[in-house]
Image (cartoon, rainbow, N blue to C red):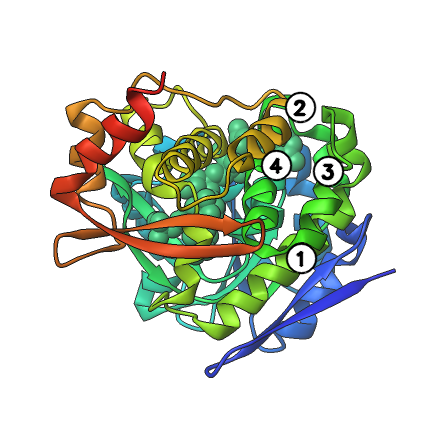
Amino acid sequence: MLQEIEVKLPQKNYPIYIENGLFTQIGTLVRKHWAKVQQVALISDSNVTPLYAEKVRIQLANAGFQVYLYTVTAGEAAKSLGVASLLYDELLGDGFTRGAGVIALGGGVVGDLAGFVASTFMRGLAFIQIPTSLLAQVDSSVGGKTAVDLPAGKNLVGTFYQPDAVLIDPATLTTLSQRYLVEGYAEVVKMAAIASTNFWQLIEQVQSVPAIIEHAEALIKASVTFKAKIVMADEKESGLRQILNFGHTFGHAIEAGANGALAHGEAVSIGMVSLTQCFEHAGLTPAGLTAKLRHQLTAVGLPLTSDLIGQADFYNRIAKDKKNHNGRVNMIYLKAIGQPAIYPLALTDLPDFVSQHLLEEK
Ligand SMILES: NC(=O)c1ccc[n+]([C@@H]2O[C@H](COP(=O)([O-])OP(=O)(O)OC[C@H]3O[C@@H](n4cnc5c(N)ncnc54)[C@H](O)[C@@H]3O)[C@@H](O)[C@H]2O)c1
Ligand SMILES: O=C(O)C(=O)C[C@@H](O)[C@H](O)[C@H](O)COP(=O)(O)O
Ligand SMILES: [Zn+2]
């Protein structure tokens, strides 16, 4: 049955549709939201295009859209100003104008890049997300954060630009590699840790990789319902939304410092564990919570540590975190499962904090 979760915001409302096999309804669903759109840019990547682009193109063509497919090379490197600029040129060359629409078909990389292009080309085209990785289905397709990276760090150029709809077909997860299924699950663990003990009990049923697929629909529904609630309360991240960054202060620095060796969710997994270990040692997180997190993440083979932590590059990258204010970085930690809190730590104190509470413990 088609499930619908509504994201209600001051400027617009939009639905997140979830159904196994939803791909057969894409034409109808997109037309429902885009009555007047004719030209559509379908942006995907070199792994997803051969699997799903033709299916989607036919559906859209049958619904009366004129579809242009643009395929970027799979991987984080596509989230760059250079690739965005190539896409602008292609759109111009193909005669795209303001009434057109952009559809992201792929993982979080395609979603962030296509959303960025949609939000900036001619000051904004209509935008729809069709996420195909677990990470994109549970997190990145919802909430309107779009971005490209700079050499200095992740997501340093971007916009808040909400889609008109999010179309999730969990059946696409059957073609996703185990590595990316598991890294996407790290964001589910993040959501559960900050959301509630109920959500945590749900993920406790996942003690192996096949269990992620088995419970996929429930995990997606719980994640997007929770994320939608946070986004509705604080769309532009002036306060509460920062909790969705649990694990990311360390995670972004580790991911960027690893130069492509770590996927986003893998870095977030390391970020959540190392940060929680610091706060547990500092007495702000209750004893035993790091072990709980570790257990949940290792059950599916996620990494927990990185040698990058404590290096100069690690602190330099954290100094550019978007949550920094007045020389302090807002660290998200857990007072308990479902009780995230913000700890503004002076950047100058961070190396000592990490040495004292994490590195000396090793
Ligand atoms: N905007 C947000 O709120 C938000 C939230 C979380 C993460 N992100 C961003 O998302 C990105 C990570 O997303 P990701 O983990 O999806 O990475 P990704 O987009 O690189 O996808 C992972 C891999 O899976 C492939 N793939 C995707 N769907 C597939 C399918 N159904 N079958 C086979 N292969 C498939 C991709 O080609 C890629 O090789 C990072 O750049 C991160 O910063 C953004
Ligand atoms: O939607 C949000 O808000 C998030 O923080 C979700 C994160 O999982 C995601 O990685 C996001 O892109 C990080 O945002 P950033 O502002 O730290 O770049
Ligand atoms: Zn993330």
Mark toward the viewer: 3 or 4:
3
**Marks 1 and 3, the one that precedes in the sequence:** 1
From mark 4 to mark 2, how far is it between C-alphas? 11 Å
Label 1 sits on what residue type? Leu
In which quadrant of the rendered view does residue 252 lie?
A: top left
From mark 3 to mark 2, how far is it between C-alphas? 10 Å
- For label 4, the residue is 185
Label 3 sits on what residue type? Glu
Q: Secondary structure at mark 1?
A: strand
From mark 2 to mark 1, how far is it between C-alphas? 29 Å
The answer to whether 312 appears left or right of 162 in the picture is left
The residue most toward the bottom is: 10
From mark 3 to mark 4, how far is it between C-alphas? 12 Å
- For label 2, the residue is 299
Between 273 and 137, which is closer to the camera in this rendering? 273
Q: Visible in this render: residue 307?
A: yes
**Marks 3 and 4, the one that precedes in the sequence:** 4
**Marks 4 and 2, the one that precedes in the sequence:** 4
Q: Position of residue 175 (x, y in %)?
A: 71, 29
Q: Secondary structure at mark 2?
A: loop
User: What residue is shown at x 60% (from left), y 33% (from top)?
Assistant: 292
The answer to whether 159 appears left or right of 192 in the picture is left
Label 4 sits on what residue type? Tyr
**Marks 3 and 2, the one that precedes in the sequence:** 3
- For label 3, the residue is 204
How crowded is the residue under tag 1: few (<14 C-alpha within 10 Å), some, or many (20+)? many
User: What residue is shown at x 15% (from left), y 25% (from top)?
Assistant: 312
